[in-house]
Image (cartoon, helix red, strand yellow):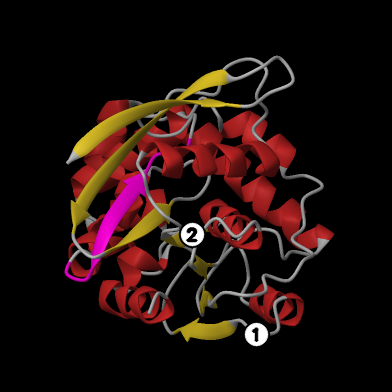
C-alpha cells in the first residue's frame, strides 16, 4: 500500500520538514528497501512479493526521486543528510532498527545506515562508493547520458520502444542484463522517473568525492555484485570486501547493475539470508 510520511530533519537553520513516499506490504521483521540514483521504489517490484512472505517490506522513494518531493532548501543531497533523513523516517514509522537492502546509491546508503548502527543488517547490491576515480568518471558519464536521453525522448517514442524486447533493451540494457524481462509499463515508468527526478543533479554532484572507507562492525553485512554489471564493474566488490572484511561477498551470475529484475528469486534469497 502506498503512503507518505512527513517528519523533521535537523539542519543548521533548525529542523526542516521532509516528506517521503513509500509502499509497505508483508509481515515479520521490518526490511527497508532503498533504490539507486534516477530510479524509484518500483525497481524492487520483482522481489517484493517474495520478500513479503517473511518480512514487513517498506520500499521507499528517496527524496527527489519517484513520488517523493525534493529536499527543502537548507538540506543537502549528501550522504550525511540522507542518512539523517532515513533515521528520522524509521522513527516516524516506529521501525526499531530494521533490516535494510539497497541497490547502487541505495546500497551505499544502506552501508552508512549500518555504520551508524541504525539498522540490524545490511544487504548492498552493487553499492556505490567503491570505485576508482576512472571508474567513477565512467559511471557518472553513463548516468548523465541516460538522464539526458530520458529527458529528450518523446513519451510516445518511449512507449513504442517499450512494447518490444529489443526496444526495452535499447532503453534499459545499461542497468539490466535481461531487459526483456522488464514489463513495458515498468520501462516507461522508470524512464519518466529518471527524466523527472528533481534530486538527480545535486545527488550526482555530491558523489564526486565520495568513497566508502570505513568498516561496518557489529552487524551482518552482505555485498552482492552481478557478473554482468556494466555500470559499477564487479571488481569493486573485491574492494568492498577489503574495506568491510567480515562482509559476505556474493556473486550474482548473469545479473546486471539492478539485479532484482534479472534474477528475482536469487536476489530475494540473498536478501533474506542476509537478514536472518
Residue 6, placed above or below residue 53: above
Q: Nearer the viewer, residue 184 or 217?
A: 217
Whichever of callouts 1 and 2 sits on the residue coming sooner in the sequence is 2
x and y percent of residue 200 in the render?
A: 57, 33
Q: Nearer the viewer, residue 92 or 67?
A: 92
Q: In percent of the image, x 30 and y 27: which residue is there? A: 155
For label 1, count other residues whose C-alpha is less than 10 Å away and answer few (under 14), some (14-19) or many (20+). Answer: some
Residue 158, placed above or below residue 211: above
- Which residue corresponds to mark 1? 246
- On screen, residue 158 versus residue 65, left or right, reads left
Q: Hey, which quadrant is residue 254 in on the image?
A: bottom left
Does the magenta-highlighted stretch encompass residue 55? yes
Badge number at residue 129: none
Q: Hey, which quadrant is residue 100 in on the image?
A: bottom left
Q: In percent of the image, x 40 and y 30: which residue is there? A: 153
Residue 109, placed above or below residue 204: below
Q: In percent of the image, x 54 and y 37: which residue is there? A: 85
Does the magenta-highlighted stretch encompass residue 45? no
Q: Hey, which quadrant is residue 246 in on the image?
A: bottom right
SS of the residue under disc 2: strand
x and y percent of residue 235 in the render?
A: 68, 78
- The residues colored magenta run 53-62
The quarter of the picture where the C terminus appears is bottom left
Badge number at residue 103: 2
x and y percent of residue 266 in the render?
A: 32, 80
Q: Nearer the viewer, residue 193 or 213?
A: 213
Question: Visible in this render: residue 208?
Answer: yes
Amino acid at each position: 500500500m502506498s503512503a507518505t510520511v512527513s517528519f523533521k530533519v535537523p539542519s543548521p537553520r533548525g529542523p526542516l520538514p521532509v516528506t517521503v513516499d513509500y509502499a509497505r506490504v508483508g509481515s515479520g521483521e521490518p526490511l527497508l528497501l532503498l533504490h539507486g540514483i534516477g530510479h524509484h521504489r518500483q525497481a524492487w517490484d520483482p522481489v517484493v512479493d517474495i520478500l513479503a512472505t517473511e518480512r514487513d517490506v517498506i520500499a521507499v522513494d528517496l527524496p527527489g526521486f519517484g513520488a517523493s518531493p525534493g529536499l527543502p532548501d537548507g538540506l543537502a543531497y549528501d550522504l550525511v543528510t540522507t542518512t539523517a533523513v532515513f533515521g528520522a523516517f524509521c522513527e516516524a514509522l516506529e521501525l526499531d532498527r530494521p533490516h535494510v537492502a539497497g541497490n547502487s546509491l541505495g546500497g551505499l546508503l544502506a552501508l552508512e545506515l549500518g555504520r551508524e548502527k541504525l539498522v540490524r543488517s545490511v544487504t548492498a547490491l552493487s553499492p556505490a562508493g567503491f570505485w576508482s576515480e576512472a571508474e567513477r568518471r565512467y559511471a557518472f558519464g553513463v548516468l548523465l547520458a541516460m538522464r539526458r536521453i530520458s529527458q529528450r525522448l518523446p513519451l510516445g517514442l518511449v512507449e513504442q520502444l517499450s512494447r518490444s524486447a529489443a526496444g526495452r533493451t535499447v532503453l534499459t540494457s545499461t542497468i539490466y542484463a535481461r531487459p526483456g524481462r522488464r514489463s513495458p509499463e515498468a520501462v516507461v515508468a522508470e524512464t519518466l522517473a529518471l527524466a523527472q527526478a528533481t534530486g538527480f543533479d545535486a545527488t550526482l554532484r555530491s558523489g564526486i568525492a565520495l568513497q566508502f572507507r570505513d568498516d561496518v562492525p557489529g552487524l551482518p553485512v552482505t555485498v552482492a555484485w552481478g557478473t554482468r554489471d556494466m555500470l559499477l564493474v564487479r571488481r569493486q566488490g573485491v574492494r568492498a570486501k577489503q574495506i568491510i572484511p567480515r562482509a559476505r561477498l556474493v556473486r550474482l551470475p548473469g545479473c546486471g547493475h539492478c539485479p532484482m529484475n534479472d534474477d528475482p528469486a536469487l536476489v530475494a534469497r540473498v536478501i533474506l539470508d542476509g537478514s536472518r
